[in-house]
């Protein structure tokens, strides 16, 4: 299944700028895949880049059965979680995060002036399940962040 037409098994390269945007999305986040079932022989892996505009916060969502690993490539991030999203963790460039399957959360760009870019991987696929949203005012320390 990984062999080219010649029968030779070869790596599959997605060239920069040609990433695929046909993947699960949440409003305000741009997700592009470099490695995914949509355009490579991969069947149990999604690896891509997620970009968030300045001041962005996602809708409440989870990633179904997918285990998610993230790396903050540039910018400052926050993830809200917990029963009423009363808890959060902050991250900055160079930090890694693991988000367990089915965990509702809200991803945020803490910076009001600069974009946030994540490298993200999921298994088995980029599952995005958007949930009922939470008002900004209900997120502790969101409205009054520096």
Image (cartoon, rainbow, N blue to C red):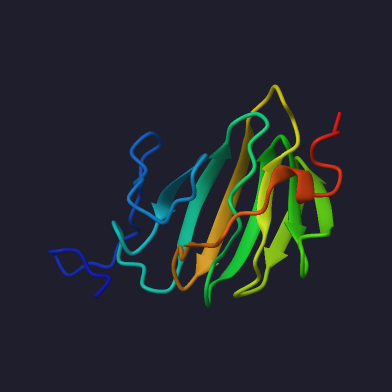
Q: Is residue 37 above or below residue 139?
A: below
Q: Quadrant of residue 117?
A: top right
* Of the pair 82 and 13, the residue shown nearer to us: 82
Counting from the top left corner in percent of width and height, residue 110 is at 75, 36
* Of the pair 27 and 109, the residue shown nearer to us: 27
Q: Quadrant of residue 120?
A: bottom right
Q: Residue at x 61, y 57 (%)?
A: 60
Name the quarter where the C terminus is drawn.
top right
Name the quarter where the N terminus is drawn.
bottom left
Q: Residue at x 31, y 60 (%)?
A: 40
* Of the pair 130 and 47, the residue shown nearer to us: 130
Q: Quadrant of residue 36?
A: bottom left
Q: Is residue 14 left or right of residue 140?
A: left
Q: Is residue 122 left or right of residue 70?
A: left
Q: Residue at x 52, y 46 (%)?
A: 49
Counting from the top left corner in percent of width and height, residue 53 is at 59, 31
Q: Is residue 72 left or right of residue 39?
A: right
């Amino acid at each position: 299944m990984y062999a080219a037409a010649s029968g030779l098994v070869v790596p599959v390269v997605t060239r920069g700028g040609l990433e695929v945007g046909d993947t699960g999305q949440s409003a305000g986040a741009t997700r592009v895949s470099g490695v995914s079932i949509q355009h490579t022989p991969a069947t149990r892996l999604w690896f891509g880049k997620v970009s968030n505009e300045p001041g962005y916060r996602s809708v409440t969502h989870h990633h179904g059965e997918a285990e998610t690993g993230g790396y903050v490539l540039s910018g400052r991030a926050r993830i809200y979680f917990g029963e009423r999203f009363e808890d959060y963790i902050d991250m900055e460039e160079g930090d890694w995060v693991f988000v367990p399957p089915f965990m509702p959360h809200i991803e945020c760009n803490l910076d009001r002036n600069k974009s946030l870019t994540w490298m993200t991987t999921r298994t088995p696929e980029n599952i995005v399940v958007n949930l009922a949203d939470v008002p900004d005012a209900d997120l502790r320390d969101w409205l009054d962040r520096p």
